[in-house]
Amino acid sequence: MVLRTPRLVVRDWSEDDAAAAMAIYGRSEVARWLSPAVPVIADEESMRATLRGWIAENAASEAGVGHWALTLAGPDGASGRLVGGASLHPLPVEEQDVEIGWQIDPEFWGNGYATEAGRGLLERAFANDVDEVFALVRPANQRAEAAARRVGMTWVGETGKYYGLQLNVFRIRPSDLVAGRSPAPAAEQRSDAGA
Ligand SMILES: CC(C)(COP(=O)(O)OP(=O)(O)OC[C@H]1O[C@@H](n2cnc3c(N)ncnc32)[C@H](O)[C@@H]1OP(=O)(O)O)[C@@H](O)C(=O)NCCC(=O)NCCS
C-alpha cells in the first residue's frame, strides 16, 4: 500500500489489474482526454503492457513520483474495487517538472475520489522533495479543471509546448495544499474581511 486516505487505498499497479483497468481506461469518456499523452489503449493486452511500463517506471522513479491504482478501502482497510488511477510523472522533454494526472471510472465521478487521492499523493510528494506540481488541462475538460482547483491548484498560464495541444497550466506548491485542505468557513471570511 502506498497511501491510505479516508475512503481509498492507493497502491501499486499489478498486471492482474489489466481487465479492471481496461474497463476504465477503455471508456471513451476517459480515453478522449488522455490521448496522446497516454496512447489509446485498444485491448486488455495493451492495457497489460501499459501497466508493465508503469510498474517498471515506478521501480526507477524518485520517491513520491509514479503511477498508482486507486481502490475503495474495504471495511478492514484492505484494497478493494479499482475506481481509477493517478500519476505524478515528469513532464516530457526536460523531465524536470512534475505533472499530476487522474483517471476515475465514470461510474464513480462526483464522489470526490480524484480530490481525495490527489491531496494524499501531493502531500506525499511534497514530503519527498518535490517542490511544485503542475496539471495540464485541455480547456474543455471542466471536470479535470475542477479537480485541480479542488486540491488547491491555481491557473498560472497556457502552454502549447506539450503533446501538440494548447493546454491550461495549473500549479500547486506545498503551502497551497495546506490552504486547500482547511478552507476557512465563509462566515469567518466575511467577519475577517469586515474587521
Ligand atoms: C478528471 C476526473 C478524474 C475528475 O473526477 P471527479 O469525480 O469529477 O472529481 P472529484 O473526485 O474531485 O469529485 C468532485 C465531485 O464530487 C463531489 N464530492 C462528493 N464528495 C466529495 C468529497 N468528499 N470531496 C470532494 N468532492 C466531493 C463534488 O461536489 C464534485 O461534484 P460535481 O462533479 O457534481 O461538482 C474525471 O472526470 C476523469 O477521470 N476524467 C477523464 C480523465 C481526465 O480527464 N483526467 C484528467 C486529465 S489527466
Image (cartoon, rainbow, N blue to C red):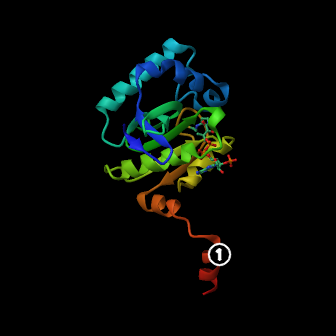
- Whole-percent x and y of residue 13? 41, 28
Q: Quadrant of residue 164?
A: top right
Q: What residue is disc 1 on?
A: 187
- Whole-percent x and y of residue 51? 43, 22
Whether residue 61 sits left or right of residue 76 in the image: it is left
Residue at image x 44%, y 17%? 49
- Mark 1 neighbour class, 10 Å CA radius: few under 14, some 14 to 19, many 20 or more: few
Q: Quadrant of ligand 1?
A: top right
In this orientation, does residue 107 appear? yes
Residue at image x 64%, y 39%? 109
Mark 1 CB within 8 Å of ligand 1: no
In this orientation, does residue 69 appear? no
Relative to 93, is 22 above or below?
A: above
Callout 1 secondary element? helix
Whether residue 9 sits left or right of residue 35 in the image: it is left
Q: Residue furthest front?
A: 76
- Whole-percent x and y of residue 86? 48, 37
